[in-house]
């Protein structure tokens, strides 16, 4: 019998990148459902929100940035610790690499395992993975919030609560009302909840909503323009999480095992969310973590390449 492959391993088609200006000097770099990146050009320097997966992929973005500014890339902000977001950081030569304290803790605890498992799951996203020099370590961390001033432009970094991971941060430009949400918010793309706190995530999104953003760069999907579209994306992400949590809670109360809960939760989510990017890839990881959470496992267990395959074969095989 052929080895069961991750749904994402069959996703090999190149994606078209779009570089769009959301406000003066504030850009979204989106790639048809692949992880997004944000760019802020200040008076004297450039800030990047999320690094891309490898230095080679980062260089693609650098080339685009050089089409609009020659200012130095001084700040690299990591929304969270996942390899696909952070391992391209070395290409930018940024003086400051910034993350929440909890994100740095997670890199130390499970960064290498996450690197190995993500490369296995998403080979296309790790083009030229051999150019990655190692884990990306922040040299500035903060607990709840901090402001960076790029000359007269403020970029406010905030940890609003646990969600996609326990260390997620958003970048908020209060004057421009632009938010870079990382993977707390997705648009037309399935939330990855394998390292999440599902119930807390729903509440954290209320705090994201309260910012009143009029433009947003979500973790995946098109850049969002207009307060209504931003609110819709947040509420759609919440709806996915609420449906998943409700289904899994019901299954646990009935005494169902993980495979039974996965089947019923897949059926509950498929009608409204089944056409979202990476739906079939994410669901086994999402349900496995949320099932653990409903059973009282407070913090996500570490995913390894070996655990990934065991879970995938058990639920999809």
Image (cartoon, rainbow, N blue to C red):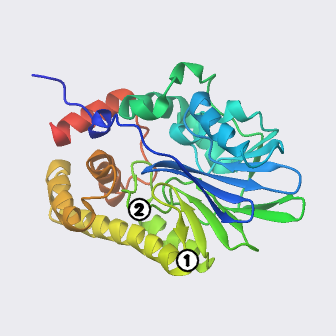
Instruction: Give the Cα separation between the discs numbered 2 and 1.
Output: 27 Å
The answer to whether residue 113 is visible is: no
Which quadrant, please, contains the N terminus? Answer: top left
Q: Name the residue carrying label 1.
A: 226
In the image, 193 versus 197, the foreground residue is 193
What is the quadrant of residue 295 in the picture? Answer: bottom left
Residue lying farthest to the top in this orientation = 130
Disc with the residue nearer the chain's start (2 vs 1): 2
Is residue 17 in view?
yes
Name the image quarter holding residue 6. Answer: top left
Q: Residue visible at 35% across and 37% down?
A: 13
Q: Quadrant of the C terminus?
A: top left
- Decide: marks 2, 1 in contact (CB < 8 A)? no
The residue most toward the left is: 1
Crowdedness near tag 2: few (<14), some (14–19) or many (≥20) residues, C-alpha within 10 Å = many
Q: Where is residue 27 drawn, in percent x and y?
A: 65, 57
Looking at the image, which is closer to me, 133 or 313? 133
For disc 2, the marked residue is 198
Q: Position of residue 294 (x, y in %)?
A: 32, 60
Residue drawn at x 13%, y 53% as measured from the top left: 260
């Amino acid at each position: 019998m052929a080895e069961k492959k991750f749904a994402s391993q069959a996703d090999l088609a190149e994606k078209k990148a779009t570089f769009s200006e959301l406000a003066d000097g504030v850009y979204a770099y989106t790639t048809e459902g692949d992880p997004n990146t944000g760019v802020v050009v200040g008076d004297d320097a450039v800030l990047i929100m999320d690094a891309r997966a490898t230095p080679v992929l980062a260089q693609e973005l650098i080339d685009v940035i050089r089409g609009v500014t020659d200012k130095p890339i001084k700040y690299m902000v990591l929304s969270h610790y996942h390899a696909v977001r952070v391992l391209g950081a070395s290409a930018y030569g940024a003086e400051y690499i910034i993350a929440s304290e909890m994100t740095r803790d997670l890199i130390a605890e499970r960064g290498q395992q996450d690197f190995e498992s993500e490369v296995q799951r998403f080979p296309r996203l790790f083009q030229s993975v051999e150019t990655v020099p190692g884990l990306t370590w922040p040299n500035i961390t903060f607990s709840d919030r901090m402001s960076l001033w790029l000359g007269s432009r403020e970029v406010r970094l905030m940890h609003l609560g646990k969600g996609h991971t326990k260390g997620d941060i958003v970048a908020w430009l209060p004057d421009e009302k632009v938010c870079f949400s990382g993977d707390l918010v997705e648009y037309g793309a399935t939330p990855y909840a394998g390292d999440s706190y599902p119930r807390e995530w729903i509440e954290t999104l209320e705090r994201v909503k309260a910012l009143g953003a009029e433009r947003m760069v979500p973790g995946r999907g098109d850049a969002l323009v207009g307060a209504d579209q931003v609110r819709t994306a947040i509420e759609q992400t919440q709806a996915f999480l609420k449906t998943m949590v409700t289904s899994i809670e019901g299954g646990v109360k009935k005494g169902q095992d993980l495979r039974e809960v996965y089947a019923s939760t897949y059926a509950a989510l498929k009608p409204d969310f089944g056409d979202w990017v990476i739906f079939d890839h994410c669901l086994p990881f999402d349900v496995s973590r949320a099932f653990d959470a409903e059973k009282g496992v407070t913090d996500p267990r570490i995913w390894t390449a070996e655990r990934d395959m065991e879970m995938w074969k058990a639920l999809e095989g």
